[in-house]
Amino acid sequence: MSVAKLIVGNWKMNGLLDDSRTRAQELADAARNHKSADFEMVLCPPAPLIAMVGDIVKDTDIKWGAQDCHEQVSGAHTGDISAQMLKDLGCSYVILGHSERRQNHGETSAQVNAKAQAAQAAGLIAIICIGETDAQRSAGKADEVVTEQLRASVPETATPENTVIAYEPIWAIGTGKTASADDIRHMHALIRAKASEKVKNGAWLKLLYGGSVKQGNAGEILHIANVDGVLVGGASLKSGEFWGIAQASAEGKALSA
């Protein structure tokens, strides 16, 4: 099992052809000039940009993915995209169950579970997102909420080869707030323990942290126990900063569990 950190850029609903082409090209050039065994980089642009981004980075070590998929293989699902379509575009990963999907589109953990199964069946790696709201944390229910989301969102078909878990405290997404090292350490240890109960060889599942990750805090976050990478939102739209976040995987002082 590779120990390389997984650095995923979620561009969300940002980018037009010109600026996205420039961003992808800058990252592709960096990857060609600075090969590293310390991290694996994945770009997840909006659906209309996937083919272009993939074409630009295809001769580098950078992989690409999508931000969602439908649970069905095909059919009358206007506006949706199947996992098979994403695989056909060369995608390796797909983000599922992001809090913005859960909140803005009413997605349930059961739906995330079904999408993850579809992604795995198509040969994609599902990045399944879980995390609590500020109100849930304040009420002392963070552990309970995250444990239940993990239980219901991760399918029985999950393995360390086809599944990644991303812990994203909702109160830290796009707010500038970042969970403390102790918060991250505690939650990732909990997720590791619960995942190991549910998934065969779950101790080898990659666990990502997401929530206002930037170059200035990535070095510390990436060296907390049980943090195997990061899911980056806004900072992934700046190629220099995103590359700096990836390079931070080789820097910093490892923190104890």
Image (tube, rainbow, N blue to C red):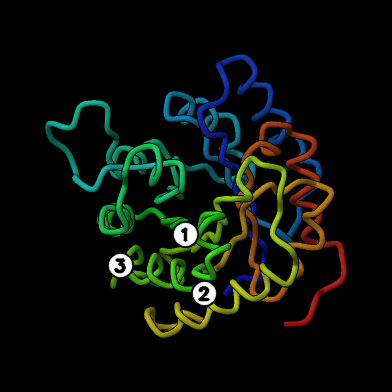
Task: Tell me the crowding category of disc 1: few under 14, some 14 to 19, or many 20 or more residues within 10 angstroms, Cα based.
Answer: many
CB contact under 8 Å: marks 2 and 3: no
The image quadrant where one finds the C terminus is bottom right
CB contact under 8 Å: marks 2 and 1: yes
The numbered mark, 2 or 1, whose residue comes first in the sequence reads 1
Viewer-closest of 11 and 22: 11
Mark 1 lies on a secondary structure that is strand
Mark 2 to mark 1: distance in Å? 10 Å
Three-letter amino acid code at the position of disc 2: Ile
Which residue, given by chain and number where applicable, does mark 3 sit on? 155
Three-letter amino acid code at the position of disc 3: Pro
The numbered mark, 1 or 3, whose residue comes first in the sequence reads 1
Residue 107, position as x, y percentages in the image: 31, 47
Which residue, given by chain and number where applicable, does mark 2 sit on? 191
Q: In this view, does 141 lie above or below 85?
A: below
The numbered mark, 2 or 3, whose residue comes first in the sequence reads 3
Which residue, given by chain and number where applicable, does mark 1 sit on? 130
Q: Which residue is drawn at 75% across and 67% down?
A: 181
Task: Tell me the crowding category of disc 3: few under 14, some 14 to 19, or many 20 or more residues within 10 angstroms, Cα based.
Answer: many
81 displayed left or right of 125: left
